[in-house]
Image: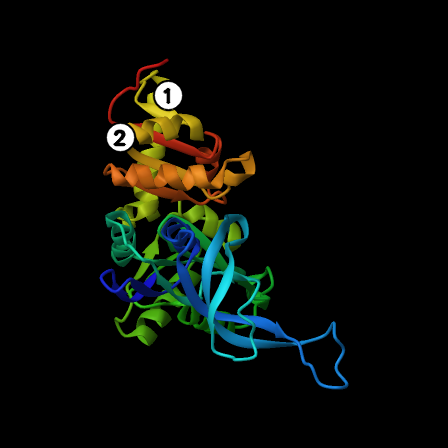
Amino acid sequence: MIVHSFSPRHGHCALTLENADDLWTLRRLVSKGDVVTTRSSRVVKKEDEYSRPDKGERVKVTIALRVEDIHLDSSIEKLRLKGTITEASDESVSKSGSHSLTLSPGQALTLRKDHWSPLDTRLVNSTRDTSTRFVVLAIDRREAGLGVLSGSHLAVVSSTDSGLGGKRGQEQSPKPFITKTVELVKQTLGVGDTVVLAGPGNTKNAVANQLTQDLKGGHPVRIVDGFDLSGIDGVRALVKFQGFQDLARDSALVEMQKFVDEAIRRIAVSDPRIAYALPNVRRAAQSGAVESCAVSNDVFSVNVDEEELIETLNAIQEHGGRVFLADSSLELGKQVSSFGGIVALLRYALKSY
């Protein structure tokens, strides 16, 4: 999340959403009665002599919406807000009735609250301390897969193939494939990103050399050896490969791997300092017992109540606990999903009733 300006004293925060983790953060920040201002579209009905009463023109407009209902659809990376319009940049837009906003990564907005709690402030400030993003390329002489790892969320960006034949003596030049791949990586890079390349053969080295030359030290370029997959499957496998985890040892993904390993260990040895499934984690959170917690982004598929989940996550952090968001497309996320979508490590065992 890019925080452009933040003034709790004046009640507003201007930001841009970058990824799925940011949608979860915003879901926890926005409450009923808050005002969200962003660009949207609205159907404006014309009232001239020849216009049809059931037709209208859809116009782009900046809208300030007083929130009445909030719903996170993490499976398709959307946050839906419903409420009443308090301000609009187009005078033809009616301020009566309700309106819906759909927020997604890449969208800029301003959030206004009458009161910013200490937790709200921590949530905003924590987004400024996010770990390094990794632009991940799994490549061989025939195909390349490109992804972005931000926090613990992996987004698959694109894939491409070289069109080269199987017999080396009849191959065309690999230079066009290398040039195309380098340009895809450069288009994906953001400020402060690290590039990680892996895959069988020497193609990754050729791409790394070209990137190092083009980027002129502006982004670190790292090669992971000993990894033999390429393409999109290679991207997904690389983030759990030990060589990558050694390189990204301070990332949220590696920290969450340690969390999941410890959760599995505690279950295996019947350590009572663990809770899973929302009712149990909620009780532990309310008592201040949760040290850290992971929630899968497909948690709503098991009919979890959204409001209860958000209250539970907020309670954990209010008592000094840490919350991880697990990407269900990765093996770690699937493991968290197997615990009912949410699992917590406890500071102490809870009494059973």
Q: Nearer the viewer, residue 333 or 322?
A: 322
Q: Given this view, does label 2 or label 1 mark the residue nearer the observer? A: 2
Residue that badge 2 annotates: 288
Q: How far, Cα to Cα, is label 2 from label 1?
A: 21 Å
Looking at the image, residue 201 sits to the left or right of residue 219; the answer is right
Mark 2 or mark 1: name the one nearer the start of the chain.
1
Report crowding for label 1: few under 14, some 14 to 19, many 20 or more residues within 10 A (C-alpha): few
Q: Is residue 229 visible?
A: no
Label 2 amino acid?
Answer: Gly
Residue tagged 1: 267
Left or right of 174 in this view: 14: left
Question: Front-most of 92 and 320?
Answer: 92
Helix, strand or loop at label 2? It is loop
Q: Residue furthest top?
A: 353
Q: Quadrant of residue 314?
A: top left
The residue under label 1 is which amino acid type?
Answer: Ile
Residue at left 27%, top 71%?
Answer: 218
